[in-house]
Image (cartoon, grey):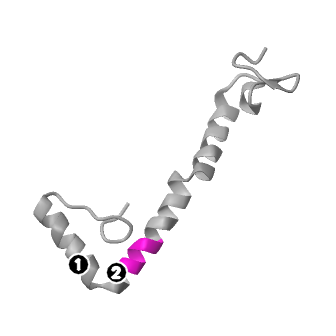
Amino acid sequence: MTDKDNILIADSKKEFLAAIQTLSEHLDLREKMRTNARITYEKYYSNASLSKKLDKVLQQHAEPGLAKGLRYNGKVSSTGK
């Protein structure tokens, strides 16, 4: 995350209000931040991105069967049995 690239960072209410004022006055900055914030969300925080990360962790650390949704005879099981 980078200030004025994909997020607004302010240490006080006064700084935050000034940043909002700058955004309201500069369409180009507003559009850049909107686009970059969406890219950041998709890359790091979207359901698809988080699912991929979770799948990777499960593949690396889970018992056999756990990473495949704990399926047993076509049914989801909390124990994998």
Q: Which mark is residue 74?
A: none
Instruction: Check whether the beta carbons of the residues at disc 2 and disc 1 lie within 8 A of each other.
Output: yes
Q: What secondary structure is found at the residue carrying circle 1?
A: helix
Q: Is residue 76 left or right of residue 19?
A: right
Q: Residue 23 in the image: x percent, y percent?
A: 28, 77
Is residue 1 placed above or below 35 in the rendered structure? above
Q: Quadrant of the N terminus?
A: bottom left
Mark closer to the chain start, 2 or 1: 1
Disc 1: which residue: 22
Residue type at mark 1 is Thr
Q: Residue 8 in the image: x percent, y percent?
A: 29, 65
Q: Is residue 44 left or right of residue 23?
A: right
The residue that appears at 49% across and 66% down in the rendered structure is 38
The residue that appears at 20% across and 76% down in the rendered structure is 21
Considering every residue shown, the one lying at the far right of the view is 73
Q: What secondary structure is found at the residue carrying circle 2?
A: helix
Magenta-colored segment: predominant secondary structure: helix
Foreground: 60 or 18? 18
Residue 74: say if magenta: no
Q: Residue 12 in the image: x percent, y percent?
A: 13, 58
The boundaries of the magenta stretch are 29-35
Q: How far apart are the alpha carbons under marks 2 and 1?
A: 8 Å
Q: Which mark is residue 29?
A: 2
Q: Is residue 42 left or right of residue 19?
A: right
